[in-house]
Image (cartoon, helix red, strand yellow):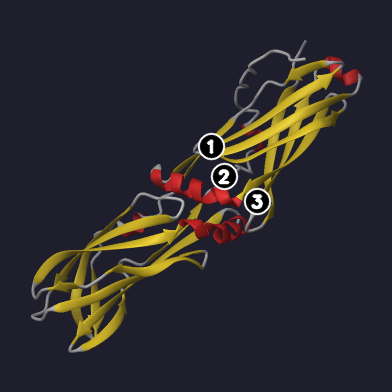
Amino acid sequence: MDRPQIESVDNEWGTVTADRTEVETQIDVDNPLLLRVGDATANVSYTISANDIVLASEQNNRVRLAGGESTVSVSTMIDNDQLPAWWASHINENETTEVRIEPDVTVDYAGLRLPADRWTHDRTVETDLLEPLQTNRSQQIQASDRTLFVVEETDAQWGNATTNSTPIQAEATVTNPTDIRVPITEIGYTIRLNDIVVGDGIAAEQAVIEPNSTRSIEATAAMDTAALDEWWVTHLQNDETSTLSVEFTATLEYAGIQREVPLDVLSYDRTFETDILDEHSREAFAAGSPTPPANDARS
């Protein structure tokens, strides 16, 4: 007997809250000839995973089918508590996420269980959020209209991300062209995603740049991974587009007075997209090859 066929799958985001994210899915099923002359029902399951982390899994039983082609609607809920684990995996995999969407349809008719040919849809999502910090652009840092030091180059890399914290390890090569010592009492930072603060604090404590010398200064900022649920809502509301903003400031001690100055050479904005569901590629499923089910029929 011919199997049911999954013809296409259409996904879009539904209701989004800080706790849950709805995925609305339409699955077009082509029924075999036998099923077109009578009533049949289907058991439908749907799974979304990212870097092997299951974000959502749903099953609807006894969905009625009719005619040669049927459209099955599935509403799947992502538990936003899974987002920190996904984010940490994305960062630790060189800012890469492998998304897998797996619909499964099994038709019940006249005591027979007929699994549809399975389809899986794999998609790679990549970002490059630290690229603006990897530069040899030179910038003068001034106070009271006097150049105190010059940032010659900067670099940055991610530390090991966890479900609690995502560290950014930044480094700057700094030259003091003056004849006086320049103490930096601290370097502060603020990290925002779509204007939502997801990290702030002290990135580095006291360092001294000696006269007419060059040295490296390290700063470590950290995102609060566990606080990403509020950002996630804005990310989906903006069509899966976000802006990462990182701001660094330095507190300098000069002529007996402390001054806070912006470190613009380390501060930047970076816009990125994800398109996790690949919403604009309905035919992506139909373009691939079906994955055969484990068993031909089950009763």
Q: Which secondary structure lies at badge 1?
A: strand
Residue corresponding to mark 2:
276
The numbered dot on residue 123 is 1
Is 294 located above or below residue 265 in the figure?
Answer: above
Q: Residue at x 50, y 57 (%)?
A: 226
Mark 3 and mark 2 lie on one chain; the one further toward the N terminus is 3
Discs 3/1, front: 3
Question: Are the two marked residues, 1 and 2, in contact with CB atoms closer than 8 angstroms?
Answer: yes
Q: Label 1 amino acid?
A: Arg
Task: Mark 1: give few (<14), some (14-19) or many (20+) Cα within 10 Å.
Answer: some
Is 223 located above or below residue 116 in the figure?
Answer: below
Q: Label 3 amino acid?
A: Thr
Mark 3 and mark 1 lie on one chain; the one further toward the N terminus is 3
What is the CA distance from the residue labelled 3 to the residue labelled 1? 19 Å
The numbered dot on residue 21 is 3
Could you say which quadrant of the image residue 293 lies in? top right
